[in-house]
């Protein structure tokens, strides 16, 4: 089993920056896909970024603003978010899977393990 815990969400002003973190525990050695998703109330979870251990991939709407990286501790992954707007969905989830899906990494169902989310609130 793999457990994921997100942190770093808080209130930030529009235009500001945040760094989210995801701490993995358990069977971390079997993880080959890591992802970040976000969700607004009543909406589907949407893809933000993913990492296959070599290359990060980003949703078009976050390119140039968000950066996904591995922490110095190999069981940690970060999402640096710059230029936040009030339109950003508020809850961010970390996800992981043992298998990297080249064609499906943007889809939530490609990830078996999920954190409980961290809340990001952007004020005007």
Image (spheres, rainbow, N blue to C red):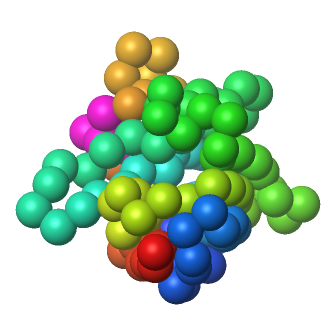
Question: Residue 38 in the image: x percent, y percent?
Answer: 37, 56
Height in image: 102 above or below 116? above
User: Closest to the observer: 28 or 5?
Assistant: 5
Height in image: 42 above or below 47? below
> Residue placed at 57% from the left, 77% from the top?
13
User: Closest to the observer: 21 or 19?
Assistant: 19
Q: Main secondary structure of the magenta part?
A: helix
Q: Residue furthest top?
A: 103
Question: Residue 103 in the image: x percent, y percent?
Answer: 39, 14
* Left or right of residue 18: residue 101: left
Task: Tell me, yes or no, if residue 118 can be seen here.
Answer: no
Chain part drawn in magenta: 107-111
Q: Residue furthest front?
A: 124
Height in image: 28 above or below 21? above
* Left or right of residue 4: residue 54: right
Task: Tell me, yes or no, if residue 31 can be seen here.
Answer: yes
- The N terminus - image quarter: bottom left
> Residue placed at 46% from the left, 75% from the top?
124
């Amino acid at each position: 089993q793999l457990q994921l815990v997100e942190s770093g969400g808080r209130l930030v002003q529009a235009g500001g920056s945040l760094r989210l973190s995801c701490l993995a525990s358990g069977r971390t050695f079997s993880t080959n896909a890591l992802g970040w998703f976000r969700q607004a109330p009543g909406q589907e979870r949407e893809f933000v970024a993913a990492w296959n251990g070599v290359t990060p991939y980003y949703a078009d709407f976050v390119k140039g603003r968000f950066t996904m990286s591995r922490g110095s501790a190999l069981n940690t992954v970060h999402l640096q978010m710059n230029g936040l707007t009030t339109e950003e969905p508020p809850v961010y989830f970390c996800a992981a899977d043992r298998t990297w899906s080249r064609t499906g990494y943007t889809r939530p169902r490609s990830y078996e393990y999920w954190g409980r989310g961290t809340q990001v609130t952007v004020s005007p």
